[in-house]
Amino acid sequence: MATGTPHRKERGAKTGRSPLRRALSRTAWPALALVALALVALTLVTNLTSGTRHTLVVASMPYWNIQHDTAVVLANRKDVNEVSPWIYGLTPGGGIVTQYSSGAQTAAGAHDIQRMRQAGLRIVPSIANITNGNFSYQPIGRILHDPVLARGQVAAIVSLVDKQDYAGIDIDYENLHAGDQAVYLRFIRELAAALHARGKVLSVAVFPQTSAADVSSANPAQNYAAIGKVADQVRIMGYNDHWATSPPGAVAPIGWVKSVLNYATSQIPADKVVLGIPLYGYNWGDGPAQTISWLQALKLSRQYGATASYDKTSQAPTFTYTSGGRLHTVWFENAESTTAKFDAVKGDSVAGVYLWMYGYEDPGTWSALHHTLPTSGSGASSSSTAVP
């Protein structure tokens, strides 16, 4: 669930992200591969036998980077329990298709998924309303407002899950309209019932809110409480408080993150709330900011002799530099800023977190994860409830 622009929609923006094709062009970083880490997502579940709630680490891997991410996940297998390959989109007619650009890529992706399955990882892939490389409203809008088509897509998703032996599905339908709320909820309820009848799980991605009044073009169709009643995981996109076309600032300042958590848990059972944590940053200069990784930020600071400072209020690193006579402002995430968010999750006792990015995060992130939200052992939290 990551390229040269973030997977999630920019707050306050109509479309929320640059076209994926343009984003993909900024992800060709072969020279950086040795330092890369996979995108991870974490949720906490209870082991009903032991009564201990363990951290379920879900690696959410975009299709264009799945081979590399698979290697990283398997190298950190002890800290990963589940993966969500971000691989499915929709045709203009609403059919479910993989987003790979070639048959060879599709075959390679299937091989990687099989490797992860053999390692004992639960597979819960993501379906997004991506059509021809871009988020598109028309296919999903038509489906949602036609009960026959909606039931057909529910059946198609269930068939996909059964055929591929997935543990469930993650729904990432974006750019929905205010008038879609009722039909979207009807679709989610029907999909949840169909999946649960087969012992499968449903995850739903939603945009962040800090209050009931925090409604924008990004989230009018998303009713936290209603979704939380039927979904097994509600993945809150806890990032983009500042975005590509906003003034510079932290992607996910800790005060805002805590407000997002507080509102989410007031509407959704805490054991279903999964907080999205960013592992990327932005470089503001001329025009819209460019999305950058931790490693890119590090290279820029060294190239221009800039020293990053750590903003204690936002709990995020930042620096400035000048290139071509133009001032650039960079805010990004590192192990310290991510740990602050892990601590917030641990303190709120919510289900857990998922980390969204597309490579090259601070290597210290894994150590922070291991010590702050352990997957097992004496450091794991205690709980009496479970997410299926």
Image (cartoon, helix red, strand yellow):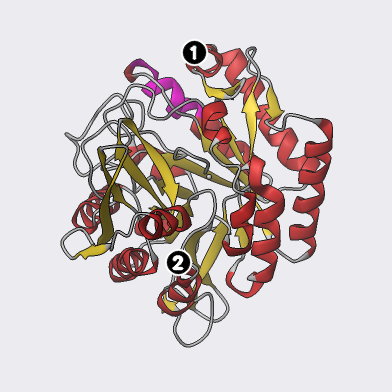
The spot of residue 336 in percent (x, y) is 34, 69
Please indicate, yes or no, whether residue 278 appears anywhere in the rendered image: no
- The numbered mark, 2 or 1, whose residue comes first in the sequence reads 1
Count the marks.
2
Badge 1: residue crowd in 10 Å (few <14, some 14–19, many ≥20): some
- Amino acid carrying label 1: it is His
- Amino acid carrying label 2: it is Thr
Q: Which residues are magenta?
A: 179-187
Residue at image x 57%, y 51%? 60
Q: Which residue is at the front of the view, 363 or 82?
A: 363
Q: Which mark is residue 145?
A: 1
Residue 369 sits above or below residue 23 on the image: below
The spot of residue 286 in percent (x, y) is 30, 31
- Asked if the magenta segment contains residue 75, the reply would be no
Q: Which residue is at the front of the view, 312 or 228?
A: 312
Mark 2 touching mark 1, by CB under 8 A? Answer: no
* Name of the residue lying farthest toward the bottom: 378
Main SS class of the magenta portion in the image = helix
Residue at image x 36%, y 18%? 177
> Callout 2: helix, strand or loop?
loop
The spot of residue 130 in percent (x, y) is 57, 25
The reply, left or right, for residue 238 in relation to residue 193 is left
Q: Which mark is residue 385?
A: 2
The reply, left or right, for residue 319 in relation to residue 234 is left
Badge 2: residue crowd in 10 Å (few <14, some 14–19, many ≥20): some
